[in-house]
Image: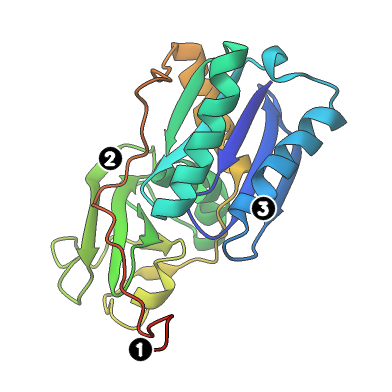
Amino acid sequence: MILCIETATPVCSVALCDSAGVISLRESRENKSHAAQLTVYIEELLKEQNIPVSGLQAIAVSKGPGSYTGLRIGVSAAKGLAYPASVPLIGIETTKSMFRGIKNEAIKKYDLNSKSLFCPMLDARRMEVYYCLYDREGNTVKNISASIIDNDTFAGYPDSVTIVFFGDGAEKCRDIIDRKNSVFADYMISASHMQAPAYEAFNAGSFEDIAYFEPFYLKDFIATVPRKNIFGN
């Protein structure tokens, strides 16, 4: 079994999976709940299945891009579990698991053809989003970037091509992107969507170096300055 950890967005999600699918899942949509909930969810899933950390095939973690704090918490927990138990660590691109989580349902729901594109979007503060483009087979059409979206961002793609926008960054772009054949799909990120890419990486022997593995932040963390002086000056 592989333990999958997803903390790249405000959703805190943990899934225990085998090669056939998801065995058990715990998740919360409560904002900033990662620090309080993550270890509790992990302990509950392992206890429920009566399996020690050392009995896992691997631990998979969403490596980003996404929330700086969320990624730090998830990756730190994954490394802290994997290293002492000598369990392989797998890093999964957040946008890749998002694509795998929505692909089949979106193809049926929106009657997508072979030329359709998928655009996972993650909120990157203010009007920026992290996004990329995949074709229907999961091949990368545009690499991940942090961008401020405007009406010309997708002008290079023919209006005849349907683009499915989804993720917590897509909603704030809904009124900005004005192109034909644009679909804004309901989607909530989940560790359960990591099952397929995690086992693909496991079978390929694609593991991270636990000592040196870091989240894929894409851009530097910028600390904000409090608007109000806490000392009242």
The image shows residue 153 at horizontal and vertical percentages of 18, 67
Q: Is residue 59 left or right of residue 69?
A: right
Against 74, is 23 above or below?
A: above
Residue 114 in sight? yes
At x 33%, y 40%, the residue is 216
Q: Quadrant of the C terminus?
A: bottom left
Q: Alpha-carbon distance for marks 1 and 2?
A: 52 Å
Residue holding disc 2: 140
Q: Alpha-carbon distance for marks 1 and 3?
A: 33 Å
The image shows residue 58 at horizontal and vertical percentages of 58, 19
Most distant residue in the bottom direction = 233
For the residues bearing labels 1 and 2, Cβ distance under 8 angstroms: no
Q: Earlier in the sequence, mark 2 or mark 3?
A: 3
Residue holding disc 1: 233
Q: Quadrant of residue 140?
A: top left
Image depth: mark 1 or mark 3 in front: 1
Against 120, is 78 above or below?
A: above
* Amino acid on which disc 1 is placed: Asn
Q: Quadrant of residue 173?
A: bottom left
* Amino acid on which disc 3 is placed: Ala
Q: Secondary structure at mark 3?
A: helix
At x 45%, y 44%, the residue is 72
The residue carrying pointer 3 sits among few (fewer than 14), some (14 to 19) or many (20 or more) residues within 10 Å by Cα, namely few
* Amino acid on which disc 2 is placed: Thr
The image shows residue 14 at horizontal and vertical percentages of 66, 41
Residue closest to the eye, 108 or 221: 221
Q: Earlier in the sequence, mark 1 or mark 3?
A: 3
For the residues bearing labels 2 and 3, Cβ distance under 8 angstroms: no
Residue closest to the eye, 50 or 158: 50
Q: Earlier in the sequence, mark 1 or mark 2?
A: 2
